[in-house]
Image (cartoon, rainbow, N blue to C red):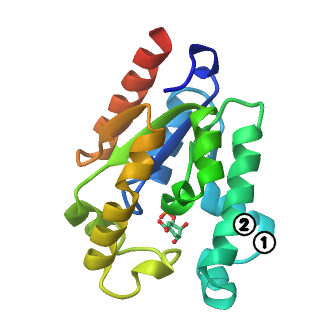
Amino acid sequence: MNSASSRSAHIVLIGMMGVGKSTVGRRVARELSRPFVDSDDEVVARTGRAVAEIFATDGEPAFRAIEEEVMANLLASQTPSVIAAAGGSVLSSSTRARLRESGTVVWMRAPVDVLVGRTSRGTHRPALANDPRATLTQMETDREALYGEVADITVDCTAPITAVVGAIVRSVNEVDAQ
Ligand code: S3P
């Protein structure tokens, strides 16, 4: 759990691919009049290359190293923001340590069936090229404890986006008021 003094800092959305971190994050940011940033977008901006291209050409460890640096920069920013942290960013222990100090961490959750549907669009998820259901199931098993380790709030994201945005804004306000 983060200290009360850090709560007014960033709101960081974590969770599996396809749970809606970017879509929901943009709306939460608008409601709270904060800037929105997405770690995958920052990787692309920094490298000038697509996520899928970095995976294919340099491999996953190279992508994770860039992701770790990008997350460190985003979390160090002095402007309280809403940050969508890509699904695998919690694999880094130093990112997890920084997340615990960064503000309010919201773990967005949804059943694998929902994630499969939502990840069927888009091209920045090379890990899901083969058998997305099996891959997402295994990833969730592998990462569940890591998400749980850093989360201040857990929000069920099965509902339509407007309801999820409302639930996150309410939860963050409740944590701030404590
Ligand atoms: C990944 C999640 C993706 C992207 C990459 C790997 C993961 O981001 O960084 O495809 O390992 O969970 P989103 O969570 O924004 O889809």
**Compared with residue 121, is residue 73 higher up or lower down, i.e. above or below?**
above
Q: CA distance from mark 1 to mark 2?
A: 9 Å
Q: Position of residue 131 (x, y in %)?
A: 30, 85
Mark 1 or mark 2, earlier in chain: 1
Going 57% across and 35% down the picture, which residue do you hit?
Answer: 100
Q: Choose between 50 and 65: the one closer to the eye.
A: 65
Crowding at mark 1 (Cα within 10 Å: few <14, some 14-19, many 20+): few
As shown in the figure, which amino acid type bears the numbered disc 1?
A: Thr
Going 63% across and 33% down the picture, which residue do you hit?
Answer: 102
Q: Position of residue 115 (x, y in %)?
A: 30, 63
Q: In this view, which residue lies farthest toward the top?
A: 178
Provide the secondary structure element on which disc 2 rests. Answer: helix
Note whether residue 25 is visible. Answer: yes
Note whether residue 50 is visible. Answer: no
Between tags 1 and 2, which lies in front? 2
**Compared with residue 60, is residue 85 higher up or lower down, i.e. above or below?**
above
Residue at image mark 1:
47
**Compared with residue 14, is residue 68 higher up or lower down, i.e. above or below?**
below
Do the residues under discs 1 and 2 have CB atoms within 8 angstroms? yes
Q: Position of residue 35 (x, y in %)?
A: 66, 37
Q: Choose between 137 and 28: the one closer to the eye.
A: 137
As shown in the figure, which amino acid type bears the numbered disc 2?
A: Ile
Going 60% across and 53% down the picture, which residue do you hit?
Answer: 93
Residue at image mark 2:
66
Quadrant in the rendering for residue 12? top right
Q: Choose between 3 and 86: the one closer to the eye.
A: 3
Image position of 48 (left or right of 99): right
Image position of 24 (left or right of 40): left
Crowding at mark 2 (Cα within 10 Å: few <14, some 14-19, many 20+): some
**Compared with residue 36, is residue 146 higher up or lower down, i.e. above or below?**
below
Specify the quadrant that holds the C terminus: top left
Q: Position of residue 60 (x, y in %)?
A: 60, 78
